[in-house]
Amino acid sequence: MAILVTLTPPPSVNRLYGYRAGGRYMTKEGTHWKESAGWEAVAQVGRPLLQGDIEVTVYLYGIKLDIDNGLKATLDAMQGVLYENDRQIKRLYVEKHECLFEPYIRVAVEELQTENNPALYDATLFEDDGK
C-alpha cells in the first residue's frame, strides 16, 4: 500500500540552487522549501522510513515548469521522512496534470515487491544467449 503526501511545489531550479567557484549549493530559499516540505510530509504521515527498494510516483498539478524541474529537490526532501535515502528508488514515475486550483505535488511511495518483477534483480534475464 502506497504512502501518499501532498506538498507545496518547490521554487524553480534557478531559485533552489546557486553557483560559485566551489560548485553548486542550495540557496536559503531552497533550504527553507526542503525543510518545509519535510515537515508537511511528517504532519500528514509521520516518519514511516521505508527500508528496502521503493517505487515513487510524483504527480505534479498545475505546475508551469518543466516536468523535471524541482524533481530532485522533491525526492531529496522526502529523505529521512518517507525513506532513508533516495538511492532506494528503483522505479520512478512522474506525471504532470493541469489544475484549476493552486499548484501542488503529490508523492506516492511504496516498497517494491521483488517477487512481482524478478527482472529488477536478475541481470541474467537480459544476457545474450547467442541466438
Image: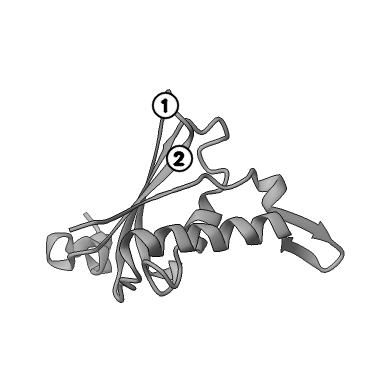
Q: Amino acid at mark 1?
A: Cys
**Residue positioned 57% across, 47% down in the render:** 10
Say whether marks 1 and 2 touch (CB < 8 Å): yes
What's the residue at 34%, 68% (across, down)?
46
Between discs 1 and 2, the one toward the N terminus: 1
Q: Quadrant of residue 83?
A: bottom left
Instruction: Using the image, tell me which numbered label, if any, was put on residue 99.
Output: 1
Closer-to-camera residue (109/126): 109
Q: Residues within 10 Å of mark 2 (few under 14, many from 20)?
A: some
The 10 Å Cα crowd at callout 1, few under 14, some 14 to 19, many 20 or more, is: few
- Horizontal arrangement in the rendering, residue 12 relative to residue 94 (left or right): right
> Residue at position x 30%, y 72% from top?
50
Which one is in front, 84 or 93?
84
Question: Quadrant of the rendered structure where residue 21 is?
Answer: bottom right
Residue 79, by quadrant, is: bottom left
- Which x, y percent locates residue 19? 80, 57
Residue 104's disc number: 2
Compared across the picture, whether 3 is left or right of 77 comes to: left
The amino acid marked with disc number 2 is Tyr
Name the quarter where the C terminus is drawn.
bottom left
* x and y percentages locating residue 39 in the rendered image: 47, 63
Query: Of helix, strand and loop, which one carries label 1?
Result: loop
Q: Residue furthest right?
A: 21
